[in-house]
Amino acid sequence: MALKQVSRRGVLAGGAAAMSATIGTCAFARRHRDPAAWLRTPYKYNKLILGGSGVAGAFDEKAVDCPFVFSHEGRFHLTYVGFDGNGYQTGIAVSDDLVHWERQGIMLARDPADPVTRYNVASASILRETELYSPGRLIRVRGEYVCAWHAYPSAGYEAGPAVIGLAFSRDLKTWRRERPILFPRDGADWERGGLYKPYLVKDGDTFYLYYNAKTAEKTWREQTGVAISQDLKTWRRHPGNPVLRNGAPDAPDSRFASDPFVVTHRGQWAMFYFGLSAADRKARDLVAVGSDPLHFTKLDEVLVDAGPHGSIDDDYAHKPALISHRGDLYHFYCAVGGRYPDDVRGISVARSRPW
């Protein structure tokens, strides 16, 4: 059956009853003998930790989306995308406990004079420690922090084929945004429709820029690939792309395998991502693991599932970002409840230990 909406938000917003997650509360009790326990966060907070501000004219008036979390100068920081009805800009918030957040305003603003970012600019990641159980501190390159952003060419919610670029800062406040480095027109068929979330990782002397992208069809699919660089300037797409492909027709990622968040732990690599099911059109957070940054095998379980009817995430729980604190793992995600176009979009969190 053809989809009525053509926006990504509309595609995600349909659906029937959610698929059952394959994990439960017993997973935490098994953590010491379960080799995948280091990935799991089965305990939802079940409240938004950040939502649309509701302030008329504010950059995040309507909704917030796309969390990215790190620690800096003794506090936790959360970057997020704010939507004002016209397009995206990137905000930042701070916290001492990963639950209560104080908005600090815009971190990366659109530029009406720039044809690339005049409507949208979304910082999706800042280069940070790759080890999942580290404090998640930022990494400087030649004295500067590096953020990866994407921008859609038209007004509205993710309208048009987006491009990816980098920006640099010495203080996390003033950013020097450079020209885009990846364009959909230069990619293969799986990414010709537009590029989505970029996630930047440094391993040794090599930079890996993971990103999801869509096909050009009206009813498109999304998959995840990676570009590689030694200097943050010259990039080559990995010839094995996409490194994360859509699953079988009945799989939870049969339509989308999107929004990568890539970490390491004890010699293993893990790519957290969200899947969209063609069967029920629900979005849920999943994971794939591997022994190197280019090869991943999906685990057959759901890490954070869409919630029951009436919950904050009864439409979907997606777009993962993780950090550890005092031995506990916190899994931030975009929670959407209600029915499109009257849904409520914000950020929530799940944890490895009960609340």
Image: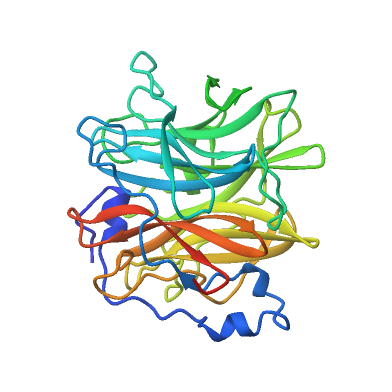
In this rendering, the answer to whether 30 lies above or below 149 is below
- The residue furthest top is 113
Percent across and percent down for residue 276 are: 40, 63
Decide if residue 109 is on the left or right side of residue 40.
left
Residue at 23% of width from left, 59% of height from top? 3
Quadrant of image for the N terminus? bottom left
| Residue depicted at x 40% and y 24% | 117
Tell me what residue is drawn at x 18 percent, y 53 percent.
Answer: 341
Q: Hey, which quadrant is residue 280 in on the image? A: bottom left
Visible residue check, residue 192: no
Q: Position of residue 130 (x, y in %)?
A: 70, 49
The quarter of the displayed image where residue 228 is located: top right
Q: How is the image coloured?
A: rainbow
* Residue 268 spot, x, y in % from top left: 75, 62
The vertical placement of 157 against 355, above or below, is above
- Left or right of 37? Residue 158 is left
Return the residue nearer the eye: 214 or 333.
333
Residue 161 shows in the view = yes
Residue 254, percent from left and from top = 44, 67
Report how many numbered discs are placed on residues in the image.
0
Foreground residue among 248 and 38: 38
